Image (tube, rainbow, N blue to C red):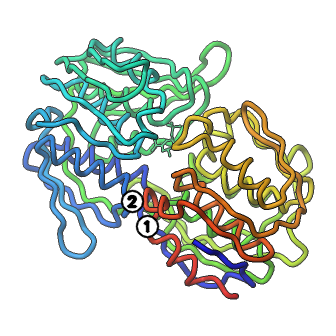
Amino acid sequence: MRIQPARRLRGRVRVPGDKSISHRAAIIAALAATGGRSRLTNYATSADCAATLACLGALGVPVRRAAGDALEIEGSGVRLPHAPRAPLDCGNSGTTMRLLAGLLAGQPFTSTLTGDASLRSRPMRRIVEPLVLMGARVMSEGGRAPLRVEGRTPLNAIRYALPVASAQVKSCVLLAGLNAGGRTEVVEARGATRDHTERLLALFGADVRTELKDYEGRPAPFVSLETPVSLRARDCNIAGDISSAAFFAVAAALVPGSDVTLAEVGLNPTRTGMLDVLRRLGADVSVTGERTESGEEIGELRVRGRDGGLAPVSATNANVLGGELIANVIDELPILCVLGTQVEGGLEIRDAGELRVKETDRIAAMVKNLRALGAEVEEYADGLGVRGRTRLRGARLESFGDHRIAMACAVAALIAEGESELEGAEAVAVSFPEFFTMLESVTER
Ligand code: S3P
């Protein structure tokens, strides 16, 4: 795909439903008491979330497309209707695989989870370990998918301290906990992560609580779930995906004269770190009409591009991202690298080694693409550093089959001089099939 620079971006966009919330809403709706029908609106259009629906269908969960963009899912209770007749294909979706593994661990049957080459290369030991502690048998080759999950009923309820800050691992254990006897507890020992699973379980009637308590001398969120649980079907309107909105927000912040409004975006505080980063680096960001819908904060986001570019407004270390902030902005780091090339003082990202085990090695991918554009980049084991206020030149860019790398490159191409060519642009369909059409609709040349 060829991409020309933008003069400015102006207009209003409504990004599709949140990917993380959509997976969870579908799974939890499927677990509602038998016969209860949940209606999900604004369900993500992403290929990843379609993979979750297909897997639920293969487990006997009735999933129907209803009028408009609604989806109707009939609950079967926390025991699924039947074993899958073939391996469950999670495609490119780590969330599908890790969350479903938790659910399948507590079923009275054996199932296999597999996915594409990228997913089959990603670390799964992080979920195998707690599921085995809970009493399931999970077989893998070298800690990678395919995973063969021999379920056990009931599972043991455990307290598990997360060795990595991962919402997928937390959610895996909590979903397994629905089929465990007693109280399952997850300690977010490495910092808080997105809490959509907890919020949705609570919305559907589960007894789930989060308390900040001392863990090894530091405060950490303790998430607990009590069984038995009976989930009630609910209608749920899914917030727009802030991780998709991020590409528009950064593009608007970077191009002077831009003015972009992002309607009905999810503003859950475990996901809005990117807005704080934008603000502290001097971007003009405002939020209006904040309200709560289906248990999640939602509102309208407006970003305007300042003349004169971006410069930090807060004093200490505004140009360094690290520590517990990382989990909050994990999916926004590729686009924040692009932002860093333009900010006074550049940007340093640390403590983000997890980026190396995403859909691709996102550190290596961004280093390569940014260097091709003429940016000055230093690569670290756990992040990267980019020099600021750099003129980017159009270049040949490569998604490495990763949706967020493709979108970050597309935005970089808008602010570069001359034409760029993006290899593997079709990867955007994994989270945001409408990305290029929506981006064009607000781009002036
Ligand atoms: C997600 C959690 C994050 C994130 C991913 C979606 C989720 O992954 O990067 O895109 O929906 O729980 P980890 O849990 O591996 O950090």
> Which residue: 58% across, 55% down?
399
Where is residue 412? Give x, y as percent.
Answer: 71, 65
Give the quadrant of the C terminus.
Answer: bottom right
Find disc 1 in the rendering and name its residue: 433
Three-letter amino acid code of the residue under disc 2: Ser
Give the quadrant of the N terminus.
Answer: bottom right
Find disc 2 in the rendering and name its residue: 46
Q: Nearer the viewer, residue 374 or 230?
A: 374
Picture quadrant of residue 323: top right
The disc, 2 or 1, on the residue closer to the chain's N-terminal end is 2
Q: Is residue 189 left or right of residue 285?
A: left
Three-letter amino acid code of the residue under disc 1: Pro
Q: Is residue 169 left or right of residue 247?
A: left
Whether tag 2 and tag 1 are in contact, CB under 8 A, the answer is yes
Q: Which mark is residue 253?
A: none
Answer above or below: position of 87 versus 337: above
Picture quadrant of residue 28: top left
